[in-house]
Amino acid sequence: MEQLQGEAMNLSPITAEALHLTGNSKFLALRRIFPLFVYHDFIYKINHTEKAWEITCQWHFSLPTLTDFLPTCTITVPHKVADRLRINDITAIETFLFQIGLMESISYWKSVCPLRYVCSLVPIPATAAASWQDWYFNGLGEFLYRNNISINPAELWTYSLTEQVEISCPLNLPDSSWHKVTSLTHFALTEPVDNGKATSDARKVLIPVGGGKDSVVTLELLREKERYAFAINPTQASRDSIALAGIDEEHCLFVQRRLDRKIVTLNQLNFWNGHTPFSGIVAFYSLFAAYLTGIPYVALSNEASSNAATVAGTEINHQYSKTAAFESSFRTYSCLYLGAAAEYFSFLRPLQEIAIARIFAHYKAYLPYFRSCNLGSKEQANKWCNNCPKCLFVSLILAVYLTPQEMRTAFGADILQNENLLPDMAGLLGVTPVKPFECVGTVEEVAYAVCKLLNRYHRTEQQLPCLLQAAATWIAAGRCSLLTFTGGEYVYAGPDLQKLQPAPFLNPEFQEILQNKMKNLEDEHE
């Protein structure tokens, strides 16, 4: 048996040998050694403070013979917006917490990718298990690709309830205020939830805020609604955006989510590591928050561009849980198993990233405060690193609509002079077949932005920054299929990126808001 204590682990020789393998050899070896992942149970408490209700939960997962995982979360619901009846509906609370645990478990399952997933709490219906298999396979598409794992969806994960698994580290109740859930009578909410659409609550909308330009645009365009902000482990950029949008603390629902640090130890020992579908986690938590408050709408800020594959010619997509496909699947799942507690949709689905950038450029007050850089936020520095593909992409599309001074206000540096980003520039522009594994837009959008910027420099006869110089060289060599230099100017030959894209889940009221905004922009341009 392996032994993990604190930050140290004693590994058996066979495990140590497996960890030195790569690709499918490592994948098959680890799942032979660790064939099971177990979702055992969870504990939770509901705490009433002076300002809010707090629901704290700790889940218990394990990889038998390796280690146990005990991740936690705390969901804070201000008194002013809490629905007291729902806060006290223990059956619904436990159902939501169980379902959130299913999504949380993916971060721990992937460390060895066991074939069999054992759920000890309640049988998982076949249709629900199929959804989870789909979300695991597509949500881990980047993880599988980058680790050179080749497997069919049906072979990745199978569900089992029949296996008896000894609990090596049982969850203990810290005190009498906690409740322990070892079994559930129902997998799903058994009755539809009254989501308030037919009442005055229909004006309420919950907006997940990440601190970037997309959620800012949603916050601003929905000002006529009764807006509530939602965030998981809110960053300073998230808090700044919420404050600038005029949303007070009583209209904020925050989740403090804490991973079990043992997963970091496993990563350091060369167990599997990689990208997980974080937006899927946002989906479950935000729906739970909407349920607890009776808010009928959850308005995401996922754009049309997120549907594009990261690896050309495949369905591998870093942003899978932001796609219309996931949105459709989760909406169906919510109706079947979560009582359709709120209508989950992406408000910005009809827009490409470049169109969102065009709208965002009108909200100058956010320029010093918004952030989209994952590296900068991980360092807790609330900054743009100006050395990653995300910083590069956002800079490119905003540079089309902002002045050089405004770009300096936002980013603090001229990222187009960073030659370290030449490989990322090539991927973003389609010169190489794999885009950076980041939340970035399409090749068409980058080509459009590069075309606009090259022509701007060409007209003013300014020296090109190194990344635009590289783009000009690639265009001259015929390596950018969407761009040519003709008649003394650069020409973009791609689709119209300002045109609204189909969004079947966006109701007419929200669709009209976007249509009016785009029409106003066109009128200003004329």
Image (tube, rainbow, N blue to C red):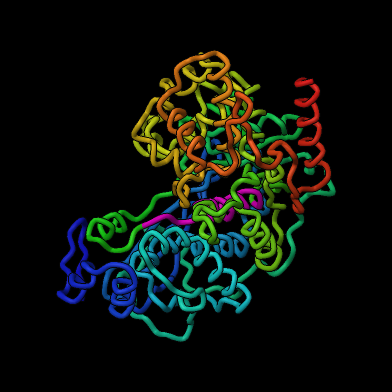
Q: Is residue 337 left or right of residue 159?
A: right
Q: Is residue 491 left or right of residue 506?
A: left
Q: Nearer the viewer, residue 168 or 101?
A: 101
Q: Give residue 399's position: percent from left, percent from top.
A: 55, 24
Q: Is residue 202 left or right of residue 50?
A: right
Residue 298 vertical placement versus 393 (above, below): below
Quarter of the image with the C terminus in it: top right
At 38% from the left edge and 36% from the top edge, which residue is drawn?
421
Q: In the rendered structure, which segment of residues is drawn in magenta?
A: 274-291
Q: Visible in this render: residue 77?
A: no
Q: Nearer the viewer, residue 131 or 476?
A: 476
The answer to whether residue 236 is magenta is no
Q: Nearer the viewer, residue 53 or 311?
A: 311
Q: Give residue 172's position: percent from left, percent from top.
A: 36, 64
- Total numbered labels placed on residues in the image: 0
Q: Give residue 145's position: percent from left, percent from top.
A: 42, 62
